[in-house]
Image (cartoon, rainbow, N blue to C red):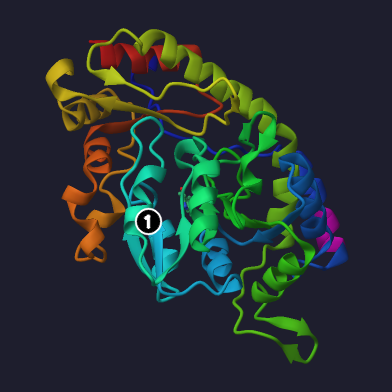
Amino acid sequence: MSENKQITVTSPLLPDLEEFNTLLKEIWESKWITNNGSFHQRLEKELASYLGVPYLSLFTNGTLPLITALQALRITGEVITTPYSFVATTHSLWWNGIKPVFVDIDPANGNIDPHKIEAAITPKTTAIMPVHVYGNPCDTVAIQNIADKYGLKVIYDAAHAFGVKVNGKSILNAGDMSTLSFHATKTYNTIEGGALICHDEKTKQRIDYLKNFGFAGETEVIAPGINSKMDEMRSAYGLLNLRQVDHAIEERHKVADQYRKELIDVPGISFFAERHDVKYNYSYFPIFVDADKYGMTRDELYFKMREQNILGRRYFYPLISDFSTYRSLPSAAPSNLPVATRMADQVICLPMHHTLSSEDVERVINCIKQ
Ligand SMILES: *Cc1c(COP(=O)(O)O)cnc(C)c1O
């Protein structure tokens, strides 16, 4: 029967229930359940220190920090972004009345191609919103050079990049702001949750006003803010998960190494090369299926895996630019996005989480090799 055990694409990192219960009792006794309570304050501090960033504000999910970052920086007009991401990236622009302008991606890492950004800049462009997709670091130096040349802001959607470092330094300090998601499916989770990272105290103050309706005091509202506060229960849960996230990342690392080692020789299956200067978080393991060389299309492999009770995910397919909301934008034309279009048609994210055994991984590999 174990042959048929379902292998899921992801599995949430859960804190020890007893320990969580102890913290819940503390919260019950204090009767302080939300609004910048002590667990919220502790989690903000511990996350900032763990991640190596000076200023971090907790949010109730990973979409509201994107929307709030655009508000905090007063971004308007057009923003250059990637179509190869989760829809929340582009939705955050739309919710701010900003026109998304899609730029193609680099096949080496799936991130926005800096060489193609300048051609998309118009007098209305005010910012660039790249994504460190799958936790692969963007070329932050090239992007910053363009931003400086044209006076643009840069907001990184770093939802996949929890703990990722280049040359020992956090990539979350790049650009003007970076956002994180702590959704259940991510490497580190608070069930639902997120954060916004900035580089100075004044900006953090403004972000904290904005995430609390714009309240700057009991009777003072300084901006049309939103409610995006994280509660005490999820902050406590997050503190416990922070203690075990390194172990979870090590387990993911083992899974990634096994995939790499055994899939390297499969004709028509490719995956991203690892950079030696990067500390990854192994949040995803995307493979790309070249149907001519592999002898089967991506969808055929995807459904064959499902028949064997192995759940991969076609992530990111369709491209954001292919959804009905966005496909009438001039920059959404597939002819403008050939690399992203090809990658979206070839990708499968293989099962990747901290509870996969080497036998589970072997089953996935055998299914692909058969
Ligand atoms: C998960 C994710 C988000 C949104 O996060 P939520 O916490 O689900 O709101 C944003 N961008 C990307 C790239 C994501 O993967």
Q: Which residue is mark 1?
A: 87
Give the residue at the far front of this rendering.
149
Compared across the picture, whether 294 is left or right of 80 comes to left
Which residue is depicted at the point 21% across and 42% down?
338
Residue range of the region highlighted in magenta in the rendering: 25-29
Residue 177 vertical position relative to residue 368 in the rendered view, above or below: below
One can see residue 102 in this view: no
Name the residue: 34% across, 40% down: 315
Q: Position of residue 202 (x, y in %)?
A: 76, 69
Quick one: SS at disc 1?
A: loop
Query: Is 357 displayed left or right of 34 in the figure?
Result: left
The C terminus - image quarter: top left
Three-letter residue code for mark 1: Val
Front residue of 193/47: it is 47
Give residue 188's position: percent from left, percent from top.
Answer: 61, 41
> Of residues 81 and 14, which is closer to you in this image?
81
Task: Tell me which residue sits at (77%, 59%) in the image.
Answer: 40
Image quarter for residue 61?
Answer: bottom right
The secondary structure that most of the magenta stretch takes on is: helix
Q: Is residue 126 magenta?
A: no
**What is the quadrant of residue 266 in the picture?**
top left
Task: Indicate left or right for 50 with 182 as reference.
Answer: right
Image location of residue 300, percent across then percent down? 16, 28
Give the mark count.
1
**Residue 246 visible to an observer of this rendering:** yes
- The relative height of residue 220 versus residue 208 in the rendered view (above or below) is below
Asked whether 77 or 151 is in front, the reply is 151
State which quarter of the image contains the N terminus. top left
Q: Position of residue 231 (x, y in %)?
A: 70, 63
